[in-house]
Image (cartoon, rainbow, N blue to C red):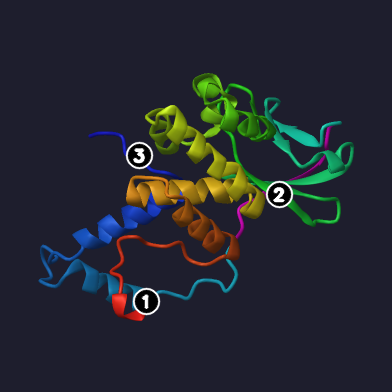
């Protein structure tokens, strides 16, 4: 079987759940009722989940370096900001994210967690992005390209120079308004749903994600009578 490809673990899990539920419409091989209906009967008898979700996280106190970054596992650097240089930082380490907090627990920034044996740095891609908007010929060997998820990187690799510059300008502009990770998530979601990177769609998706709203589902039927 081919290895599944997805924008993120959250996207993959949502797709996996939807596919499983679609398969559950068939009848149970022995009970003669749909598996989905039997599942609902079982779920009605389950105990309620705790009101507050359990947060699987490890917190550790670290001192940011002179550039305002902390290094985990000896090779993955996460930038808090130059204003936090030399200060104590609380690092919240999760499976997919790294939260950087100040000494009192106030949120500074969240980064996607890096894996792998090679070194990585969260600030290098952001620093190069503005230059790439003017010098798109440097794209193939840029750290920005290496920092992007595969679907987004593959799409940008296929663009001509003018189109690539336009798409790259969207990323820093959206990042300044909603944050780097939110901008990437918005671009990935729009690309996955529409096959392209239309600026207005990315802005709307990023705004919804930043506000905590549900992302737009482009396969939903649109009621033109409400426009």
Location of the N terminus (image quadrant): top left
Residue drawn where x is 13% and y is 70% of the image = 31
Span colored in magenta: 54-65
Mark 3 and 1 residues: CB-CB less than 8 Å, in contact?
A: no
Q: Earlier in the sequence, mark 1 or mark 2?
A: 2
Q: Is residue 94 at least partly visible in the picture? A: no
Tell me if 13 is positioned left or right of 141 in this view: left
Considering depth in this image, is 9 or 67 the residue closer to the camera? Answer: 67
Q: Quadrant of residue 2?
A: top left
Considering depth in this image, is 62 or 28 the residue closer to the camera? Answer: 62
- Mark 3 closeness class: few <14, some 14–19, many ≥20 residues within 10 Å: few
Residue drawn where x is 22% and y is 61% of the image = 22
Q: Which mark is residue 5?
A: 3
Q: Position of residue 10 (x, y in %)?
A: 45, 52
Q: Earlier in the sequence, mark 3 or mark 1?
A: 3
In 3D space, how far apart are the residues under numbered discs 1 and 2 (Cα atoms)? 37 Å
Closer mark to the observer between disc 1 and disc 2: 1
Q: Which mark is residue 227?
A: 1
Say if the magenta span includes residue 62.
yes
Q: Which mark is residue 109?
A: 2
């Amino acid at each position: 079987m081919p290895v599944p490809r997805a924008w993120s673990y959250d996207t993959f899990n949502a797709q996996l759940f939807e596919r499983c539920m679609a398969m559950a419409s068939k009848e149970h091989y022995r009970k003669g009722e749909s598996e989905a209906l039997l599942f609902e009967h079982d779920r009605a008898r389950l105990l309620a989940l705790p009101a507050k979700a359990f947060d699987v996280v490890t917190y550790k106190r670290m001192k940011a370096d002179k550039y305002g970054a902390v290094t985990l596992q000896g090779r993955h650097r996460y930038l808090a900001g130059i204003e936090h240089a030399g200060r104590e930082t609380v690092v919240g380490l999760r499976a997919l994210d790294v939260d950087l907090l100040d000494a009192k627990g106030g949120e500074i920034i969240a980064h996607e967690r890096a894996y792998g044996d090679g070194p990585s740095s969260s600030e290098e891609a952001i620093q190069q992005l503005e230059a790439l908007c003017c010098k798109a010929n440097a794209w193939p060997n840029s750290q920005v390209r290496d920092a992007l998820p595969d679907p987004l990187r593959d799409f940008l690799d296929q663009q001509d120079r003018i189109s690539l510059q336009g798409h790259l300008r969207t990323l820093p502009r959206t990042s300044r308004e909603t944050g780097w990770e939110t901008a990437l998530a918005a671009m990935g979601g729009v690309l996955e749903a529409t096959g392209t990177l239309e600026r207005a769609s990315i802005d709307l998706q990023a705004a919804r994600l930043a506000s905590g709203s549900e992302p737009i589902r482009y396969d939903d039927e649109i009621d033109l009578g409400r426009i």
